[in-house]
Image (cartoon, rainbow, N blue to C red):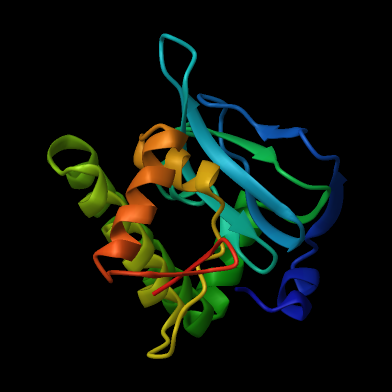
């Protein structure tokens, strides 16, 4: 994302978090740009009945939680570490100074945010009107497109993560993936999914 040398020039600090630790909670005020040096985390919301809805997974080299910085709003979701993480934190004022002084970085970030918006629009549509087969294929094809490969793509999501991202039960995901394999819409090899 943003080159480490540039982050360090603007005095980003590197903080470590343990697996399960919350980085920020829904409705907390946004004060920092976050970029993962190492590890993996999820952003999610809880419904009234306590069920978690996963907004996305983020791993090494990715940033997260930027939109509230641009509109002076609170975080729309919680961020929690799935593994131990080391994360660069850059105060909001320095983040904007960095973007002003590095237009190529600013453009790259804008493109990433636009991709995330398109993904959210697709998922909202999938959750509201489409059957499980369509939801899962749309999700998996999105990740393949994001990987920008024409070759056989290995899906790096677990069945549970696919469930969390589509709003389907894990059992439904497992059954649907088997059916999609029978329909020759994906390939299963050693319990891994390929497109």
In the image, residue 27 sits, relative to residue 97, either above or below, namely above
> Where residue 82 appears, x then y in whole percent?
71, 43
> Where residue 4 appears, x then y in whole percent?
75, 75
> Where residue 47 appears, x then y in whole percent?
41, 17
Write the residue at 18% across / 43% down: 131
- In the picture provided, is 123 more to the left or to the right than 146? left
On the rendered image, what quadrant is the C terminus found in? bottom left
Front-lying residue, 70 or 27: 27
Front-lying residue, 130 or 116: 130
- In the picture provided, is 36 more to the left or to the right than 68? right
In the image, residue 51 sits, relative to residue 32, either above or below, namely above
In the image, residue 107 sits, relative to residue 129, either above or below, namely below
Instruction: Locate residue 31: give its quadrant.
Output: top right
Front-lying residue, 192 or 57: 192
Q: Is residue 68 something one can see in this rendering? A: no
- Give the number of marks: 0
Instruction: Locate residue 127: give its quadrant.
Output: top left
Write the residue at 61% across / 50% down: 92
- In the picture provided, is 126 more to the left or to the right than 166? left
């Amino acid at each position: 994302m943003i080159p480490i040398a540039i982050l360090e020039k603007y005095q980003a600090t590197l903080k470590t978090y343990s697996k399960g630790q919350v980085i920020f909670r829904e409705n907390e005020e946004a004060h920092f740009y976050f970029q993962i040096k190492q590890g993996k985390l999820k952003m999610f919301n809880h419904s009234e009945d306590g069920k978690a809805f996963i907004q996305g997974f983020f791993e090494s080299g990715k940033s997260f939680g930027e939109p509230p910085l641009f509109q002076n709003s609170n975080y729309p979701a919680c961020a929690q570490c799935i593994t131990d993480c080391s994360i660069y934190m850059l105060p909001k004022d320095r983040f904007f100074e960095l973007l002003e002084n590095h237009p190529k970085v600013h453009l790259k970030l804008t493109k990433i945010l636009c991709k995330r918006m398109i993904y959210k629009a697709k998922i909202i549509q999938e959750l509201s009107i489409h059957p499980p087969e369509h939801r899962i294929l749309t999700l998996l094809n999105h990740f393949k497109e994001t990987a920008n490969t024409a070759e056989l793509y290995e899906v790096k999501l677990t069945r549970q993560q696919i469930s969390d991202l589509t709003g389907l039960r894990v059992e439904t995901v497992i059954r649907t993936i088997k059916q999609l394999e029978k329909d020759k819409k994906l390939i299963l090899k050693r319990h891994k999914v390929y497109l």
